[in-house]
Amino acid sequence: MSVDAAVETKTVFGSEVPQPPQHGAAGGVMRRLNFGTGLVCGIGLATIAGWVTAIITPSSASSDTFAPMEPTYVYLAVLLGWFIGFMLGMGAFVGPLRWVVGRDITHSDAEYMAGKDLGRKRYWKYTTDHKVVGIQYLIVAMLVLGFAGLLAMLIRTELGMTWTSLFTPSFYNSMIGTHGIAMIIGMIVIISGPLGNFIVPMMIGARDMAFPRLNALSLWLFVSAVPMLVSSMFMGGIQDGWSVYYPLSAQAPPGMLGYQLTIIVFAISTAVASVNLMTTILTMRAKGMTWSRTPIFVYGIFAASVMGLYAFPFFQYAQILGLSDRVFNTSFFDPLNGGSVWLYENLFWLLGHPEVYVILIPSMAVALELMPVFLRKPLFSFNFAVAGIVGVVALSGLVWAHHMYMTGWAPAANYPFMLSTELISIPVGFLVLVAIGTFWRGTAWTRLPLMAVYAVVFNKMIGGVTGVYLSDVPADQYFHGSMFVVAHFHYMLMGAGLFGAMAGIAFFFPKMTGRFLDERVGSIGLWTAFIGFQITFMSMFVAGLQGQPRRVLDFDDQFNLSNWISTIGAYVIGIGMLIFLSAIITSWRSGVLASSNPWGSKSLEWQTATPVPLENFPVLPVVTERPYDYGVPDPYEAELDSTDQDLTEKAGTK
Amino acid sequence: MSTSTFPVSPTTGEPISTMARRSRLGLWFFIVADVAGTIALVISYTYLWSLNVNGGWAPPGATLTASQTNTALPSTPPKATFAAEWPFWAIFLVVVIATALMWFGYRSARSGNHAGLMVGAGLSFLVTVAALVFQWIQISTFPFDAGDGGYASAVLLLCASNIFHLLLLLFLGMGIFMRARKGLIDKTNWYQAQLTSYYMTWVCVAFILGAILTTFLVVSPNTDPAIFGTFKQQ
């Protein structure tokens, strides 16, 4: 159809919209590109780049500071080749190139790229629909967490077999470092990725994210980073913990490049995702969705995005400088030539601590989001919860140096940082108090998501209280570098973070898949993992209090008992997680069908059909009330009632 | 069913003003991330400058006063000095000109002067190319190598950051010019030229930060630096 002979138009949400010229079939070159072409191009370009670099690099090449450079250069070329080739093969550059040459996409192109009528194929493509991206994020994040969890099992096996050694010390170190960073990356993504993408746009009443192509870009950047991280294990590994402090990192084998490039790419992915989520939340909320009517989960995702946006570049630049030291022989972190290892530590922890809240806040927010639904009462002090989130964001950038009390950097700064760290426990405490207040006198409809919230609150309290000890300089002198620290941060990141993700997945599963997550199997998995978690990390607290250092392969016999118990607990966690995973897989394939709003929730994402149509809402919704007014009389109805009553009273008087 | 009488997005049907507002906010957030990265570089530069670890800030052979010389400095013969200051300012000036031209193009687009837009965007692109060439010449003629201490490292990374920014500007400038040529930027739809102008303005700030550092924070004030060992593989 057309209004003008020269300009084609298309009906878009009821309006005739002029279209740019359509070049070929809708979707253009994107029709031919998918994950397969991404793999082929990535592997192909990696092979060619590595081969050419091996030819042109003299085998005798070396630097003043590091080991022979040939493997470093070749590995770097392979990683860069993989990254560029994969993104090229996925079609990531098509949009920017079309923009430069002025060949804008049409509505039909956009619909194709959003996966319209593509069926399951859309999950293997550079699809822009936020719901597809959410599912893709969920699967990739679970794969990353599964890989990191497998390494955790191997680590615990080694530590539990106190009578022998299964692995060489360097491979053990490599497993520790890779497990750490893979878990951190996976945990950062597991809520903000799947639920932030799938749920948030619907929750605010939008049709899609603000920048759909950037949405796909953030996902596929993340995907491209995963093989880089895994490949590092085959190049000597990450042998210096997830924080890769210098000078150890400078002396590490070429596998360190895998870590550095993973972080550089992941930071870009995070920045892109953060920009997209923040812009979506700020500009695309439904009419009537004031800040007091915006669900708490949206606040949580927004807060995580803010922290990711300002903090990740520091981590990214720390790795860029480290890579530059390694490859170009600069000396940012080489004290012999004017560098400083403390510079690295500062840059690293400027992200390192906000990152804890990037994981924790969405987890707490998802818990607070679903509690009113299952307790059928309003959130206890919505404003208090928002204040807690704002307080965490405000203070998150002022606490980094509590990780450096014992490094000798600026001892005079220890006490201000102790104060700021103890201060941040106040807004974090707000969130726990809001959760407890919401439980208070609630009529609990104890379904699987709410069970996971019980676990989150319990773990969060233990993690929070033990964290206060570590923020205290005198106490940290004893606890620093011990298994106590390991137990503490597992309570925060896994106990609160991962169990929060389980709560969120169980809650939103019916909307994402159209089916219920199997309550029975899921609950067995959840509680098995919870019990295993307590066994593992309570015992680890004991080992830490006894003085067992972390990251150490061989230790004194006095720590044997607690390590045996921790290892048994870890296997129980593993079994629990596998059971939960099996619940996800079987329910996804053949679970009980769910209606569009099976929990009777009042928020917008549940008011649309399941499966969710491409445009989310046929007509954009208008919000007229708060999201958690369960059990509160409708003010309008109440007004009508009182008017009726007045009239009755007046009639009676007459 | 109505036919749009105002400029709308061909993909979503939303008014261009809505797209512009959204994109402008997105750009500000991207700039926040870029600012954080630039601050990381500034911190790195000033941190190493202030500490002068092992007396290794200055390149070997850099001109130092007697009081600034210490025994920890390598005893190798002088071979290099600090970088000249004026090229940092000269490149900054070129980027400012490119930015001013883009602003001219954008303002022309708003007022319906298509020729002005073409001239502004085209010249901005060419001047950016010149800035990139100057930047490359500066890097390749530095009187030190990457391994010549903290100053050399920090300056080279600042320049690398400049190159990254210039490449982005090239991409954006070329896009604006090509799109202007095709009539996709005009009096009713100019927000992409506006966003490019905004981003270029931020890039000017990043460049001037680098120029200030390399002009006013050259010789380390720390004349009694800490002396550490080496982490060379033995």
Image: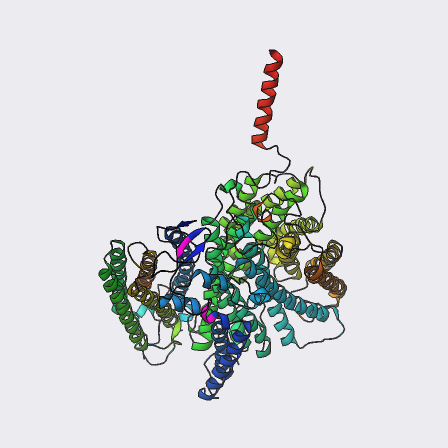
Coordinates of residue A131 in the picture (x, y in percent): 56, 58
Taking A1 as reference, is B131 left or right?
left
Q: Can residue B83 be seen? A: no
- Residue B121: which quarter of the image? bottom left
- Residue A522: which quarter of the image? bottom right
Coordinates of residue A303 in the picture (x, y in percent): 51, 51
Taking A313 as reference, is A376 left or right?
right
- The front one of A160 and A73 is A73
- The front one of B100 and A469 is B100
Q: Can residue A241 be seen? A: yes
For image coordinates 61% across by 12% down, the residue present is: A653
Coordinates of residue A373 in the picture (x, y in percent): 65, 44
Coordinates of residue A142 in the picture (x, y in percent): 63, 64
- How many numbered circles are shown? 0
Q: Is residue A27 magenta?
A: yes
Taking B17 as reference, is A32 left or right?
right
Q: Which residues are magenta?
A: A16-29
Magenta residues: mostly which secondary structure?
loop
- The front one of A477 and A83 is A83
Q: Look at the picture and state if A637 lies above or below A428.
A: above
Taking A319 as reference, is A101 left or right?
left
Q: Look at the picture and state if B189 lies above or below A440.
A: below
